[in-house]
Image (cartoon, grey):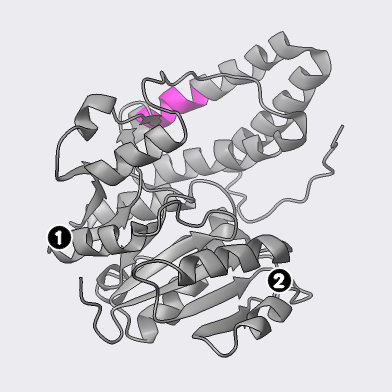
Amino acid sequence: MIITQNSFAAFIMTFQRNETLESTIKIILEQSVSPQKVVIVDNDPAQGAKIVADKFNHLSVEYYSVGYNSGPAGAAKKGLEILSKDGYEWIGWIDDDDPPIFKNTFEVLLKLGSENKQCGCVGAVGQRFNSKTGLMLRVPDNELEGEGYIQVDNIAGGMCKIVNASVVNKCNILPDEKLFYGFEELDFDLRLQTAGYLLLVDKNLYKKHRIHFNRSGVNLQRGQKKPKNRLWREYYSTRNCLIILHKLKLYRALIHSVLRFNLKMIAGFRFGFSYGVKNFKYVSKGIIHFFLNQKGSLIFKINNK
């Protein structure tokens, strides 16, 4: 496909992962269709990623320091603001540790988006959302057979998310920085759909990813044990899920989710007492902070053992 001037740019969110960031930039610039500009959005107050940006200063790589840790939600908002104001039509929303797997990923996605006038976002893979339960649903393997595309409800981080800039410029839809971490893409995508846009994924590209990661024929299992040093994420996923459901007035799903999270607090003890206590702490705090309307970041003392 032909990429015209100011048609495609990307931002990469990063926080103290310079080697990973440098590798991702190189992979992105080697795509069959690469961004005309790449903006590094650095959440590190010490501006650690600037040294990486300087290595690519002969190319269209720019550096932006947020000045504080704004989380993925804040960084994504800033990246979309910068590149939409610069006049780009399509904007890649990239995590520093999730570059494209295949060399023609951007080319396939931009072709798909440009051929569908109602398309607000494209991605390599996506998920469905049950508005009655608040749960994410896996796209069945059989829907990925044949040519063409399918519609999804969420294209999350690490899924080569590319946003139509008109979503920002015409509808002023931006990530909610107060979510800080977790489900900020879902919140963005659901509001995008409310405004009349579609989220699309290419069937062949999606299927190639399932085969690459050996995920064909996999049944989604909930309630699995998570690494103890990552249980802090349960706070954000719990709180933000409830915030989003309340914001969109999905009250049935909100009640369902509150009950599910309460069961989750108890179920965690089947993996041991210390695991159960830690899980209970983060999930319960997420529920409480939802009802207290407390948003933003929360610093935890994470036990890495």
Residue 212 in view in this figure: yes
Left/right of residue 27 with respect to residue 285 in the rendered view:
left
The amino acid type, in three-letter code, at marker 2 is Tyr
Q: Residue at x 28, y 76 (%)?
A: 89
The amino acid type, in three-letter code, at marker 1 is Gln
What is the crowding at mark 1: few (fewer than 14 residues within 10 Å), some, or many (at least 20)?
Answer: some
Q: Earlier in the sequence, mark 2 or mark 1?
A: 2
- Residue bounds of the magenta highlight: 253-259
Q: Nearer the viewer, residue 22 or 162?
A: 22
Q: Residue at x 63, y 56 (%)?
A: 296
What is the crowding at mark 2: few (fewer than 14 residues within 10 Å), some, or many (at least 20)?
Answer: few
In the image, residue 39 lies at what x, y percent?
A: 52, 77
Q: Residue at x 35, y 44 (%)?
A: 125
Left/right of residue 270 with respect to residue 101 in the rendered view:
right
Left/right of residue 193 with respect to residue 45 in the rendered view:
left
* Residue 33 placement: quadrant: bottom left
To which residue does mark 2 refer? 68
Separation of disc 2 and disc 1 at Cα?
Answer: 36 Å
Q: Is residue 207 depicted above or below 88 in this figure?
A: above
Quarter of the image that includes the C terminus:
top right
**Numbered disc total:** 2
